[in-house]
Amino acid sequence: MEWTIQQLADSAGVTSRTLRHYDEIGLLPPARVGHNGYRFYDADSVARLQRILLLRDLGLSLPVIAEVLDRQRDEHKALGAHLQLLEAERARLDDRIRALRHSLDAREAAEGSLQMLLEGFNDPYRDEVIARWGERAYTESNAWWHGKTLAQQRDWKRDTDDLIAAWIAAWKDGHAPDSERAQTLAARHVDWLRAVPGTPLFDGDRERSIAMLTCVAETYVEDENFAATYGGPVGAAFVRDALLEYVRRTL
């Protein structure tokens, strides 16, 4: 029995163009070529094509398939070698996946920090700020924050971290709340708060500034998150006492 190239292609689920390519590279020559140039394939051709398609599905390249079929290379060894290549490629892909996931995790962490910067810095305390200091205090402070560039927000955050670190260092070094070092930090802390529009300190309202500083100082101890920021309850109490002493001395 013989089949034309189109009949074989249709039966095998490939294109006639694929079969012509296999002929051109010597992988699957036809059983004979008619005087009109038509290719005809016999049963041996069909069997060879079945092996070619099987090995192709398993991922072997056409040159390797040709070697297996024409040079009587051991198919088992050829498939084993190909399996090793696939496993090595999988290992490389796993390494790339791990590296990419690490990069994504780092990026998400950075974006999370960035999102914290981009959000209003007093958003978590919106209701409390409005209740104590009024809507304008909240609105103007957030407008001031969002009016900063990202670089300015980062600078502000860095300065804040430096101030907190200085408070913790002074407390751990054994300074008293009324010491020169602690009072210098308290003045710096007040200047830090005074820079925020909408606050009594920014407005120059003495009585409300005293009330605000007293409230803030007490909050550092009462709020667990703030206390943790300053190294725990003892460190927070040191900051509170230093700020209250500054209020007594200065305001």
Image (cartoon, rainbow, N blue to C red):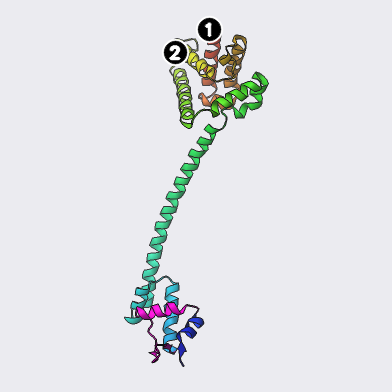
Three-letter amino acid code at disc 2?
Answer: Arg
Segment colored magenta: 13-42
User: x, y (%) of residue 222?
Assistant: 60, 22
**In the rendered image, which quarter is residue 169 located in?**
top left
Foreground: disc 2 or disc 1: 1
Residue occupying the point 48% across, 44% down: 105
Three-letter amino acid code at disc 1?
Answer: Thr
Q: Can residue 22 be seen here?
A: yes
Residue occupying the point 53% across, 24% down: 232
Residue occupying the point 48% across, 25% down: 156
Task: Identify the mark at residue 93; answer none if there is no mark.
Answer: none
Q: CA distance from mark 2 to mark 1?
A: 15 Å
User: x, y (%) of residue 237?
Assistant: 54, 18
Q: Can residue 27 be seen here?
A: no
Callout 2 secondary element:
helix
Q: Quadrant of the C terminus?
A: top right
Crowd class of label 2 (few under 14; some 14 to 19; many from 20; radius 10 Å): some
Q: Which residue is mark 1?
A: 250
Give yes or no for contact between labels 2 and 1 (Cβ–Cβ under 8 Å). no
Q: Is residue 223 above or below residue 182?
A: below
Whether the magenta-drawn stretch holds residue 229 is answered as no
Q: Is residue 92 above or below residue 10?
A: above
